[in-house]
Image (spheres, rainbow, N blue to C red):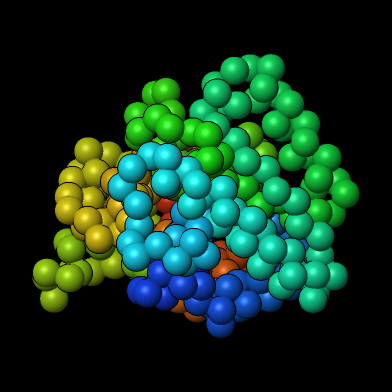
Amino acid sequence: MRIVVKVGTSTLAHASGFLNIRQVEGLCKVLSDLKNAGHEVILVSSGAIGMGVGKLSLKARPKDTPTKQAAAAVGQCELMYTYDKLFAEYNHTVAQILITAEDVEHPVRLHNFQNTLFRLLELSALPVINENDAVATDEIGIETTIGENDTLSAIVAIAAEADLLVLLSDIEGLYTADPRKDQDARLIPLVEEITPAVYALAGGAGSQLGSGGMETKLRAAEMATQQGIDMVIANGAHPDVLYDIVDGKHVGTRFVGKEKKHDNQ
């Protein structure tokens, strides 16, 4: 399978903002093993600004755009150094691709992006993709910008003609209610159609999940499933869950790609 895995800052870093070394090492080990098993893996990784904040010894995440861009420029180097070092231990080569909204909205630039992506996969490299936060300044606006990495991961999965998209976050999946507020909230294991009622379940549920949140994950799911790509939301605290997800077992919430809907019944 061709698999796109998106990891959020909450999966990569401690609450202090510094790199969660054990977590990142575990993630790289599992992704390397999936590649060894014959799968093609693409990693969409957050964390550049957060790592830049630590590297620059800033007291808090910056609020002004130029400092955010500076932190991203520094942090992206640190992020790729970490991935390069850890994946190299398992004899895998990583490649960095930084894109902006213009790269996926302009047909020629999108074609160039796809050419690079497909060739890297042919060469058995592991692409690590992020938005180019050092130069991208537009705020979230789904029609004109990327804005956050849930949407970016869906764009990448579609461009890569992936079989599966996995969003690893600090939540188990989609619930019937906010599990932080309602002890009777139940995890929904399978969603075959994203309806207004499904979107209603996201109300406030992702308020503490960084720049994404549940609503952006549902938008990503809608984008991916419309192109026939299954998408799973799962907790990234234990990267080993990726084995079960790839095997089709019930982990988190799986959104079924359109033409695959009847195959799962």
Res 260 seen here = no
Residue situated in front as seen by the camera: 185 or 148:
148
Instruction: Please provide percent x and percent y for residue 255.
Output: 43, 51
Q: Quadrant of residue 139?
A: top left
Q: Quadrant of residue 244?
A: bottom right
Q: Is residue 19 above or below residue 176?
A: below
Q: Residue at x 23, y 51 (%)?
A: 202
Q: How many marks?
A: 0
Instruction: Please provide percent x and percent y for residue 175.
Output: 25, 62
Q: Quadrant of residue 247?
A: bottom right
Instruction: Please provide percent x and percent y for residue 204.
Output: 17, 53
Q: Residue at x 68, y 76 (%)?
A: 29
Q: Is residue 217 found left or right of 70 in the rendered image? A: left
Q: Is residue 72 found left or right of 99 in the rendered image? A: left
Q: Residue at x 34, y 65 (%)?
A: 59
Q: Is residue 227 above or below residue 80?
A: above
Res 254 seen here = yes
Q: Residue at x 58, y 27 (%)?
A: 104
Q: Is residue 152 found left or right of 218 in the rendered image? A: right
The quadrant of the image that shows the N terminus is: bottom right
